[in-house]
Image: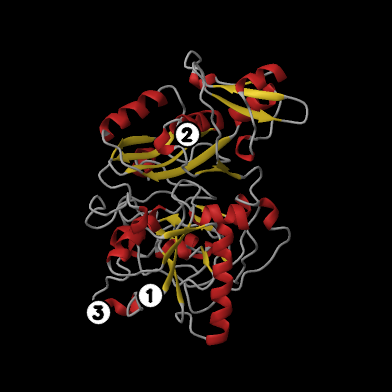
Amino acid sequence: MSGCFPAPAVISGAAVTQIVWGRRKHPVSQFSFCSSTSSWLVYNHSKHHDRRRRRWLPISEERRAGFGVGVSLQQQCDCESESENEGREDNEWVVVNFYQFVMIEDAEGEVAKHLRFLEGLDIRGRIYVNEQGINAQYSGPRRDAVAYVEWVREDERFADVLVQISAAPNGHAFPKLKLRYKPSLVQLEGGISHLPLLDPAMRATPLAPSEWRKRLEAVNTADAVTQNPNADSILLDVRNGYEWDIGHFSGAQRPDVDCFRSTSFGLSQPEVIAADPLANVDRETDILMYCTGGIRCDVYSTILRQQGFQNLYTLKGGVSHYLKNEGPVKWVGNLFVFDSRLSLPPATYMPEAITEPSRVVVSENNTFARCYICGLQVCELRHRNCANLDCNLLYLCCMNCVENLRGCCCSKCTTAPRLRPVLQGPHRYEKWHRYRDLISQT
């Protein structure tokens, strides 16, 4: 199979939004405001109104003055007619991501409160809460998805949370809703409840996307001169190796990690030092950390801080926030996401960033964009699961190997007793019972 790696296709209608809502207290109700060239609108948050059917209402100059409205940039939005807005909210599906480290004294009670609000809303995903905060990734119709995150932000503890919304063209990106108390907001060996996550000084310093871009450009310039990528700074990918295989920042070393739970950068034993980018690194070296949405960097930076690393920086909002604001500058490939979409091209976040086809140069010395089986370049930056249910390995594969091994990751799996049919196109396997009867017949 000859190499073929065209520029990622633009997903129609795909866009990402970082949400910041301005709010103003009122004795009975709470309102947000929006201006257009011809009218002013108020969004009624009255407790006497059904939260799931709130809408924009026109207000007069006199009433606007009564509210004392001074609309800032944070309070402005693009207004549509009521019918257009309702139609868009009913038909558009989105994925929402946010997290916040904050003390929650009654975490179980917080879970119950969120469950009550979500009754009747079409929300699916993973929403975890504990004494250290909340971590949420979920999908749903825009109306329901935004109603929930807006309700969350009404709590002062979450008022400044960075919310990221991306398009889900095929509907729900998660099979069901998991909203529960979880001891660790992210999985790490030994847990994270003992880490000082609530102390901002112990976490890495967050860099805005524009500042991150400047740092990357400076690092790349220095590398070109010194031929030593570890001279003054380290670009640390705090993700899994298979995520790096479909997209990463230029200059970042592939993580020798298959699961974040086992990450041990800066903690390696002598026998694995060669695979640790922080091994033997001076504790005053600048460490530039990045991950998909930011939470893994925030968690792991507290560990590195405890190990004595002093100059820790993280990309605020992760790669998704960067692609939305800066486009694919210094970024190579697609972004792996942990939902049914699996792989998102940069155009998902900034459609105007890719205007013409281009080719990505794939090195022969690494696993980026290469079939895990034969090593040839793949045509699509998207993982698939092994057809053997009891293996289920997530791997990159060229179409020749898919056909030759019937969707399996190796010849051994082709003889397994529980084989699922070969997936065609960008689909994910469903639950086993969907295939059980089919397999018994064959």
Gap in angstroms between the C-alphas marked 2 and 1: 39 Å
Residues 29 and 54: in front is: 29
Q: Which residue is mark 2?
A: 149
Q: Which residue is mark 1?
A: 284
> Label 3 sits on what residue type?
Glu
Q: Is residue 96 above or below residue 284?
A: above
The residue under the point 48% across, 67% down is: 371
Cβ atoms at labels 3 and 2 below 8 Å apart:
no
Mark 1 residue crowding within 10 angstroms, few (<14) / some (14–19) / many (20+): few
Q: Is residue 255 above or below residue 22?
A: below
> Label 2 sits on what residue type?
Val
The residue under the point 58% across, 41% down is: 169
Label 2: which secondary element: helix
Mark found first going from the N terminus, 3 or 1? 3
Mark found first going from the N terminus, 2 or 1? 2
> Label 1 sits on what residue type?
Glu
The residue under the point 32% across, 39% down is: 129
Quarter of the N terminus within the rendering: bottom right
Q: Is residue 381 above or below residue 175?
A: below
